[in-house]
Image: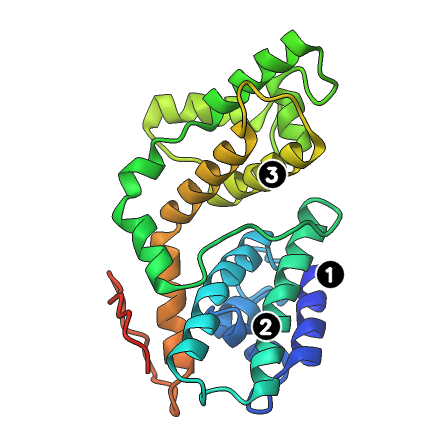
């Protein structure tokens, strides 16, 4: 339970004055139901949940970047200054834990949306962003690297390793085949890993088929991942809203959409 212990430690050192300690307090800050954290490592059912997955951390980070910021923008008096600072430190800590678990080191944050307005613009044009092809991007770059004799990567498998993607012989190739077979889309976390890595490739000066290739494709991969996560965002915002109520309701009503109210107090 290494990751869970890291999250609990982060929660304790950044805890606000009104928040509970332990797993229940952590679950509320991750915008998940408390049972999702309480069942880890306790063999409550047949599924052996040994630790918190990086996917849960990433989804909580993305939702918090928007929700905490919007909450502060809508009512400047909602947070005590020290509590708002603590919430921001917790969000930053989630990113650091995610990066260390996936890449082994802390990397710069992605330019993800931090407002409802930013998210709405993405979701309104979802068809445009879903058209991005990771497989095509990697093929173009591999061919260009082979022509230029670059040492960065000479195959799709090399790119997968660079992005810390799973799978043998290669995640990108396997996913492309599966997409052609049954129409599935890539896992959002893997797309975001590729986006992070493509920004890193730009920084390292990896050869590009054309100027700003890596930056353009990194943003495209990131936007596609965020569009795929639309339902996740909505569920996270629902959970966060319920946890902000003075009295927690016995049942969380299912949600199918989110009212993108741009008016702020």
Q: Regarding mark 3 in the picture, which secondary structure is present there?
A: helix
- For this view, does 153 lie left or right of residue 196? right
Say what secondary structure mark 2 lies in. Answer: helix
Q: Which numbered disc, 1 or 3, marks the residue closer to the eye?
A: 3
* CA distance separating discs 1 and 3: 29 Å
Q: Nearer the viewer, residue 203 or 17?
A: 203
The figure's colour scheme reads rainbow
Callout 3 crowding tier (Cα within 10 Å): few <14, some 14–19, many ≥20? some
178 and 213: which is toward the camera: 213
Q: Residue furthest top?
A: 147
Residue wearing tag 1? 2
Mark nearer the N terminus (2 vs 1)? 1
* Closer to viewer: mark 2 or mark 1: 2
Question: Could you tell me which quadrant the N terminus lies in?
Answer: bottom right
Instruction: Read off the residue under disc 3.
Output: 199
Question: Residue 44: x percent and y percent?
Answer: 55, 66
Mark 1 Cα within 10 Å, few/some/many (few <14, many 20+)?
few
Viewer can see residue 49: yes
With respect to residue 173, does 108 lie above or below?
below
The picture places residue 207, in percent across and down from the top left corner, at: 64, 21
Taking the spot 63% from the left edge, 65% from the top edge, the residue there is 92
Q: Dot 2 corresponds to which residue? A: 88
**Tag 3 or tag 1, which sits nearer the N-term?**
1
Secondary structure beneath dot 1 equals: helix
- Seen from the viewer's position, the closer of residues 227 and 55 is 227
């Amino acid at each position: 339970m290494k990751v869970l212990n890291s999250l609990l430690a982060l929660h304790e050192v950044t805890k606000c004055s009104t928040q509970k300690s332990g797993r229940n307090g952590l679950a509320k800050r991750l915008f998940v139901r408390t049972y999702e954290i309480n069942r880890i490592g306790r063999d409550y059912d047949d599924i052996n949940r040994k630790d918190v997955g990086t996917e849960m951390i990433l989804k909580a980070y993305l939702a918090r970047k928007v929700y905490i910021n919007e909450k502060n923008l809508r009512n400047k008096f909602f947070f005590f200054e020290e509590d708002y600072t603590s919430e921001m430190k917790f969000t930053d800590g989630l990113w650091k834990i995610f990066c260390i678990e996936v890449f082994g080191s802390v990397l710069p944050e992605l330019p993800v949306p931090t407002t409802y307005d930013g998210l709405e613009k993405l979701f309104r044009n979802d068809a445009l962003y879903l058209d991005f092809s990771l497989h095509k991007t990697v093929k173009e770059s591999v061919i260009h690297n082979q022509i230029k004799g670059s040492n960065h990567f000479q195959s799709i498998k090399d790119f997968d390793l660079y992005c810390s993607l799973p799978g043998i012989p290669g995640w990108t190739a396997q996913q492309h085949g599966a997409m052609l077979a049954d129409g599935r889309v890539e896992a959002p976390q893997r797309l975001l890993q590729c986006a992070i890595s493509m920004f890193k490739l730009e920084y390292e000066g990896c050869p590009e088929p054309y100027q700003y290739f890596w930056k353009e494709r990194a943003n495209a991969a990131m936007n596609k991942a965020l569009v795929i996560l639309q339902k996740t965002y909505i569920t996270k915002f629902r959970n966060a809203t319920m946890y902000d109520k003075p009295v927690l309701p016995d049942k969380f009503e299912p949600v199918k959409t989110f009212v993108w109210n741009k008016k702020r107090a």
